[in-house]
Amino acid sequence: MRCSESYELVDKVIEQVGPNIRMALPLGAGKPNHIVNAFYERARSGKIQQLTIYTALSINRPKAGSFLEKRFMDPFLDRIFQGYPDLKYKVDQKSNSLPSNVKVVEFYFAAGKSLNSPLAQQNYVSSNYTHVFRDLVSEKVNVLAQLAVKGEDASKLSVSCNPDISLDLQAHLKEQKEYPFAVVGQINSDLPYMYGDAEVEAGYFDYILEGEGYDFKVVSPPKLSVSDADYMIGLYSSTLVKDNGELQIGIGSLGDALVTWLLLRQKENALYNEILNNLGVISKFNGLIQKKGSLAPFIEGLFGATEMFVDSMMFLFDAGILKKIVYDHVVLQRLLNEGKITKKITPETLFLLIKRGAIEPQLSKKDFIFLQKFGVLKQNLQFKEGYIVFPNGNKVEADFNKEKETEEILAHGLGDVLTSGAVVHAGFFLGPRAFYDWLKALPKEQRQLIHMKSVREINHLYGHEELDRLHRKNARFINTCMMMTLSGSAVSDGLESGQVVSGVGGQYNFVAMAHELPEGLSVLQLRSTRVTRGQIKSNIVYNYGHITIPRHLKDIVVTEYGIADLRSKTDAEVIKELIQIADSRFQDQLIAEAKRNGKLAQDFKLQEQFKNNTPQAYMTKIKEYKPKGYFNPFPLGCDFTETEIIVGRALKWLKSISSSKIKLVKALLIGLTLKDDLFLTQLDRMNLRSVKKIKHKIYKALLKFALKITK
């Protein structure tokens, strides 16, 4: 049923399922904000007795903090979030003012954004993403709501960016007879029309909201800058990716850095290898790279099987790296893997499918549909009562036991190349505006190579293991963590205080899956240090009071200083590997603690080649490449203008000295002496060229000094 007004839809749902609403929403970009806000308002008015929202990654327009931050971010956010309606429940949750009859349960937060929200922390559910469907079923969710988009075929819709959990949940709701439910959608033409399981029948939804004012710009988080340390981590990680393999990567600057190096490896392989040599990567880790990775360009290409289809993958797609096509049929995929057939259809293709039992020699209707789906038989053929009917009306018995009939079918009915394959299997996507525009602009036949699926088909092997093992040759699952303990445990989602930073998401599943695949690798990327209250601290620690990935699932860890291979190693060997890629300012302390606890031999000494792990060491070496355009803070594009990039860099530096009063005073005094003429464009962007208030003059002086320092 179509509704033209959000409250009309909500009232019909209340009438159907009752005043106790347990509503599931997709994570990220797929939330139908107008519908959600209407449900929330009905709960605030009392028309809904109890509203419980189950979701993840609820995104609203960020709020800038300090004076300079507001001057910088507000115009930028006006641009990025123009026309995007905030989720009202998230606004009130953040201010701790949700009504008593509203509860918001989440299993994943935007990183660090909910640390200071007691309501969010108290109602967080720690769960593997593959188990969220189970959790929603146990809570007896009775409303599923999400965005959808219309395509050329009026009988079809696409749930676009979020088939991840909703497909499973919708099927469950339709099957269960225990309680009334409703599946509701909001049409938004800003979404790309995606295929695979994202394409659904129009009857998928019980109620659809569509009308003027209900289209809005899908939320598009801006790209983050890539630091020098990020580049180094991405460089090391890029050496572990093998051709004819599978790739999963996460969101953020580390993923952008990895993709940037993979692009260079493909397009300018000699330069890529030169950089590896000049930065000491080969001299330190060549043995490991030769054993588990590669430095060569991609010939067969990669297949992407990823929970989140990240925007950086579009560059791999355009560069012809993400081009390995896989097919959702065990026999067909095995024949391809064995090299018995290729994508080009030949008579041998058909005969091998018969020999391997994929089809019977005397075709059934089911066999015919299978052959047409994958392009083995032409699309213009029909199947009627055991006969194949050609466009000219001639018909041939569909029996490959008969020589004459076989010759006729092979001569006039065989297809050209295999079809219905995919270069990407993905659960959901979220990214900058350029990513959505790219997806929408892709020709249909190329967009159909991206199959959106349930996370239960992406994140683990259970239920479809035989096919996944064939798809995921040379699998590389590359994710990010916050800390590593010397025992090999990873900290990725929370703090030892119990506070949740983000969530487990799919990381545990991908790490575990890497150990189940013969050629699979889990690669955890880690920045070796962090700055906390002005102090530099090591992210490689002896022990920590919270872990996400247990030590028995240890594998590969990469920092800006190198690669640690932990799999199958003893405790002492794991400790040595991790200390070798730790920041040198903390290596002695880590060694001493390990020796004190009997985990390292007392006579252990770190090799000299690993004692110069400092930012200055790699920054000195990469300096020569920056004038040539490499190590760019935004290698894959950004939403900031050139002026904003310059100002942002200055503000970042200013923040780094904010804990030192002496440094701030020095910056202020020098800044007061600098002429405005040198910084007019930047001052105009910050609306600080002509200021009268003393406070504004102070900020202006600090900004001028920061601009001079970071020029």
Image: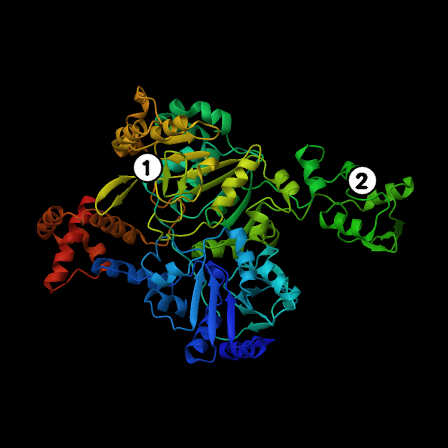
Disc 2 crowd, CA 10 A, few/some/many (<14, 14-19, 20+): some
Location of the C terminus by quadrant is: top left
Task: Give the secondary structure at mark 2.
Answer: helix
Residue 294 percent across, percent down from the top left: 49, 29
Amino acid on which disc 1 is placed: Val
Which residue occupies 39% across, 66% down?
90
Residue 331 percent across, percent down from the top left: 72, 40
Task: Give the secondary structure at mark 1.
Answer: strand
Residue 126 percent across, percent down from the top left: 45, 53
Q: Where residue 354 is drawn, which disc sits there? A: 2
Q: Where residue 541 is drawn, which disc sits there? A: 1
Q: Using the image, determine if residue 236 lies above or below residue 601.
A: below
Displayed quadrant of residue 340: top right
Disc 1 crowd, CA 10 A, few/some/many (<14, 14-19, 20+): many
**Residue lying farthest to the front in this orientation:** 597
Q: Are marks 2 and 1 in contact (CB under 8 Å)?
A: no
Displayed quadrant of residue 257: top left
